[in-house]
């Protein structure tokens, strides 16, 4: 039986020194694409977040991202457009009502 021995943080950092960190470069196209999309429910600004139900991409050594609206918190899959969690529209309804009255 092999015992698991935790590496000290300074040993981990020493082992990684000199190696480029490439995971951000792999994830950047996906997160940039999500930032360019708009919320499917309120057309608000969208921020990428790691998918809590399926955090790892099966094809890339990076996280799997979904979009989350910064206005209504709607969560959706940017690839399929499937809404994972509907947004809360109560904070934005007064703004929509004001726009309709103008
Ligand atoms: Zn929204």
Image (cartoon, rainbow, N blue to C red):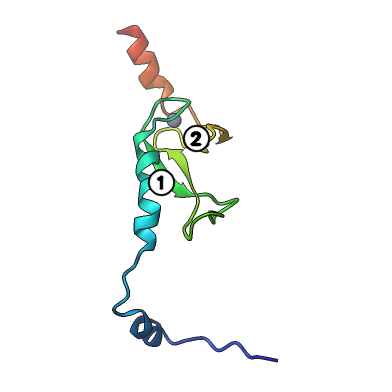
Element carrying mark 1: helix
Residue 69: quarter of image = top left
18 relative to 21, above or below: below
- Say which of 38 and 25 sits in front: 25
Residue at the image point whose x is 60% and y is 87% from the top: 4
Residue corresponding to mark 1: 30
Query: How far from the left and from the top, in percent, is residue 8?
Result: 43, 87
Residue at the image point whose x is 33% and y is 14% from the top: 99
The answer to which of marks 1 and 2 sits earlier in the sequence is 1
Residue at the image point whose x is 39% and y is 61% from the top: 23
Q: Among all residues in the image, which is located at the extreme right?
A: 1
Q: Which of marks 1 and 2 is in front?
A: 1
Q: Among all residues in the image, which is located at the extreme front?
A: 59
39 relative to 94, above or below: below
- Say which of 96 and 7 sits in front: 7
Residue corresponding to mark 2: 74
């Amino acid at each position: 039986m092999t015992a698991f021995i935790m590496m000290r943080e300074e040993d981990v950092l020493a082992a990684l020194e000199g190696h480029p960190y490439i995971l951000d470069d792999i994830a950047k196209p996906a997160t940039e694409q999500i930032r360019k999309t708009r919320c499917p429910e309120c057309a608000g600004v969208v921020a990428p977040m790691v998918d809590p139900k399926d955090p790892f991409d099966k094809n890339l050594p990076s996280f799997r991202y979904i979009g989350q609206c910064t206005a209504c918190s709607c969560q959706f899959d940017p690839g399929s457009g499937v809404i994972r969690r509907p947004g809360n529209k109560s904070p934005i309804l007064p703004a929509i009502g004001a726009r309709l009255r103008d």
